[in-house]
Image (cartoon, coloured by chain):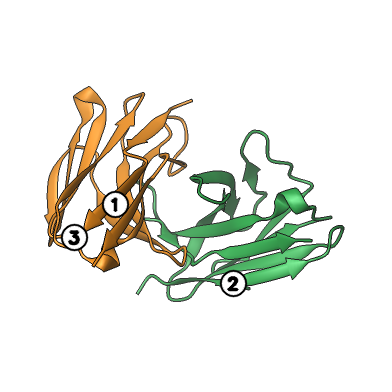
């Protein structure tokens, strides 16, 4: 099945710093999303981005589908950005059946 | 809008008992709901797809007799962990796909999760 790897696995930042999170996937995909899981476990959709670039405030994401990777940029990080960031892709043979990546655990300290 | 709730948020039970977890879409109808399991410091794994009015489809390696899913209405799906064992302790998360969703671009909305501890 499709493999989704994220790097780095852990990241510690000082408030105000910028960071880039990476998601590599092993097969062509129709659907790639980025999620933030807050410390209480709630998943929040950040981006639907199977290709191209999108921006939403301090966050932006770029997916290069032909090279099978996606990047999530966080600028001017805040303590509320802490949590786990997941990318997820739709299985080629399963409508809306998401395969989640390994995750990046982010801690932003004041 | 697009709120999904889960109940209970936390549950502790004894080994051998059964536990029911509810997933509700509060402000939309969902013909399809998904159940995920997340072990501590790990990723989410899809367990099963719940379709209103029909049998659930389970992912490979998930025991359908152990994890019973019922999607009896357009706003409610339930997951029952039968004869629970300590290894079933996990964080269970549901998501709901608004009715009529047929495209990969449609968004699943996630519940807040249920933490199950089996003693």
Q: Position of residue B39 (x, y in %)?
A: 58, 49
The answer for which chain carries disc 2 is B
Write down the colour of chain A: orange
Q: In what element is the residue under mark 3?
A: loop
- Which circle marks residue A58 in the picture? none
Q: Mark 1 or mark 3, which is nearer to you?
A: 1
Residue, disc 2: B9
Q: Position of residue B27 (x, y in %)?
A: 43, 76
Q: Residue at x 31, y 46 (%)?
A: A33
Near-viewer residue (B67 or B13):
B13
Q: Residue at x 39, y 33 (%)?
A: A4
- Which circle marks residue A77 in the picture? 3
Q: Position of residue B14 (x, y in %)?
A: 83, 64
Residue, disc 1: A12
A65 relative to A41 in the view: left or right: left
The answer for which chain carries disc 1 is A
Classify the position of the N terminus of chain B by image quarter.
bottom left
Q: Mark 3 or mark 2, which is nearer to you?
A: 3
The reply to whether discs 1 and 2 touch (Cβ–Cβ < 8 Å) is no
- Please say whether residue B105 is visible from this viewpoint: no
Disc 1 and disc 2: Cα gap in Å? 29 Å
Write down the colour of chain B: green
């Amino acid at each position: 099945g499709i493999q989704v790897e994220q790097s780095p696995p852990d990241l510690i930042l000082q408030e105000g710093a910028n960071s880039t999170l990476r998601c590599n996937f092993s097969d062509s995909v129709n659907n790639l999303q980025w999620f933030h899981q807050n410390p209480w476990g709630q998943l929040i959709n950040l981006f639907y981005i199977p290709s191209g670039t999108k921006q939403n405030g301090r966050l932006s994401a770029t997916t290069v589908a032909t090279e099978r990777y996606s990047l999530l940029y966080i600028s001017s990080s805040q303590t509320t950005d802490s949590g786990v960031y997941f990318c997820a892709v739709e299985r080629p043979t399963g409508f809306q059946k998401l395969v989640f990546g390994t995750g990046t655990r982010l801690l932003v300290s004041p | 809008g697009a709120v999904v709730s889960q109940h209970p948020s936390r549950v502790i039970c004894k080994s051998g008992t059964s536990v029911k977890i509810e997933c509700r879409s509060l402000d939309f109808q969902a013909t399809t709901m998904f159940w995920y399991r997340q072990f501590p410091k790990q990723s989410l794994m899809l367990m099963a797809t719940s379709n209103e009015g029909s049998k659930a489809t389970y992912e490979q390696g998930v025991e359908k007799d152990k994890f019973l899913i019922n999607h009896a209405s357009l706003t409610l799906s339930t997951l029952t962990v039968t004869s629970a064992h300590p290894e079933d302790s996990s964080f269970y998360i549901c998501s709901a796909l608004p009715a009529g969703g047929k495209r990969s671009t449609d968004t699943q909305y996630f519940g807040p999760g249920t933490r199950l501890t089996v003693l």
